[in-house]
Image (tube, rainbow, N blue to C red):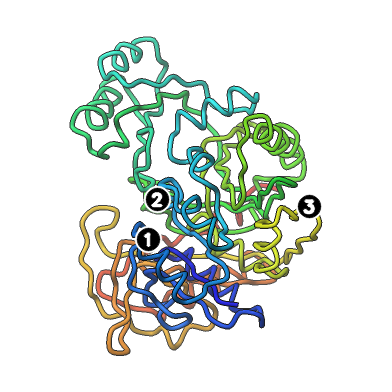
Amino acid sequence: MKILIVGSGGREHTIAWKLKQNPRVSSIFVAPGNGGTAIDAINIDIKETDFDAIETFIKKTSIDLVVVGPEVPLVQGLVDRLAPIVKVFGPNRKCAQLEGSKAFSKEFMQRHHIPTAAYADFTDALLAKEYLRSCDYPIVIKADGLAAGKGVVIAESKADAIKAIKDMMETRQFGDAGGKVVIEQFLRGEEASLLTFVDRSALIPMVPAQDHKTIFDGDRGPNTGGMGTYSPAPIISPEVMNKVQTNILDRIQKGFHQDGLDFRGVLFIGLMIVSGEPYVLEFNVRFGDPETQSVLMRLESDLLSIIEAVCDDKLSTIDIVWSDDPVVCVVLASGGYPGAFENHKVITGLDKVMNLAFHAGTKLADGIVYTNGGRVLGVAARGKTLEEAINKAYADVEVIDFEGKYFRRDIGQKALHRPS
């Protein structure tokens, strides 16, 4: 079987690593890929949004399956384009609005009584500012469209909120994504990530994980694309998971059927746990990054078989098995990220890694791996205990080096020190 993975991040390298374990897979191509996929698969110099070139490559190479990794091609309708010619894993354009428009997703949640923060949305900056007079603070301001995970501001005061509105709607800091904004209630609790496999027959949760979004230790500083994850997430206790199943997952599945949303792929559910009660913060319509690194390392079942079941609407007929062993993933970032940073720094020590280093912002040239992005690597390890997984991951972090290397030193500590 020949597989094409669309994307270039740590998520795509992890998916390639997992799919490669199936002996039925003869070739894995990644478009455009990174330094890690250049080693573990075959990179194709095609941008993830160049639909014409992707379609031509699929036909020329006789690709059997396409896995779409990132959100942008999903929101732009790549699945709709490819579905007539090849088996493709990922939601269509209509379903991808759950990530592509925060207002669309909030309306879906409200319509189907899925617990989420109270909100209002605006296309007029003046009306948005007027609405701020009636708000309690802090409050959350979100650009409606895709903003690479950075279009969210927690405004501590009305002045902060007005600035966020100006940045998004008037100066268009996030481009067209800020043409509409969602203003929502601030929920004070603890976040967790729950990825789910979805087709028309079933919605099956994966093992929960917890991300570390801010750049500095202690959950301080600006948000990033994610500085590390661990799985399982103790905040998702069996009791909380029962509430998630009844109040969120079951209602999502029912809502998909009622709204005619023919979802096939992965639905990422960002949760906020408030005094033991789960609320939905956001939906993503693909594997999360860096959650994928932690979650897929715990998957004992064959990923290819799951993907094929989803594509054929047979998810309800299979059993998915997970390891009980915890996994920790620590992100190595370029100095200055999430602000300005420099690329093309030589990465050393990858040959000394004892566990796994999933590549994200890297490139391979003449046998040398260089930095090529803000988040460079996801160093992941599995252990019999969370503490063992943390120690293994950080041991590998120490042997990898590049100029400006930055990482958080507290990944997993929140779970390790949670009161029993």
Where disc 2 sits, the SS reads helix
Asked which quadrant contains residue 408, the reply is bottom left
Q: Are marks 3 and 2 in contact (CB under 8 Å)?
A: no
Mark 2 neighbour class, 10 Å CA radius: few under 14, some 14 to 19, many 20 or more: some
Please report the residue visible at 73 percent of the width from the left and 42 percent of the height from the top: 241
Using the numbered discs, state the Cα–Cα distance from disc 1 to disc 3 in whole angstroms: 31 Å
Q: Which numbered dot is residue 48? A: 1
Where disc 3 sits, the SS reads helix
Instruction: Using the image, determine if residue 387 lies above or below residue 157.
Output: below
Q: Amino acid at mark 1?
A: Glu
Percent of width and height locating residue 128: 32, 17
Q: As drawn, is 314 to the left or to the right of 418?
A: right
* Among numbered discs 1 and 3, the one appearing first in the sequence: 1
Mark 3 neighbour class, 10 Å CA radius: few under 14, some 14 to 19, many 20 or more: some
* Among numbered discs 3 and 2, the one appearing first in the sequence: 2
Percent of width and height locating residue 318: 79, 60
Using the numbered discs, state the Cα–Cα distance from disc 3 to disc 2 in whole angstroms: 28 Å
Percent of width and height locating residue 11: 48, 63
Percent of width and height locating residue 42: 43, 80
Residue bearing mark 2 = 72
Q: Amino acid at mark 2?
A: Val
Q: Amino acid at mark 3?
A: Ser
Q: Are marks 1 and 2 in contact (CB under 8 Å)?
A: yes
Instruction: Using the image, determine if residue 121 lies above or below residue 10.
Output: above
Using the numbered discs, state the Cα–Cα distance from disc 1 to disc 2 in whole angstroms: 8 Å
Q: Which numbered dot is residue 316? A: 3
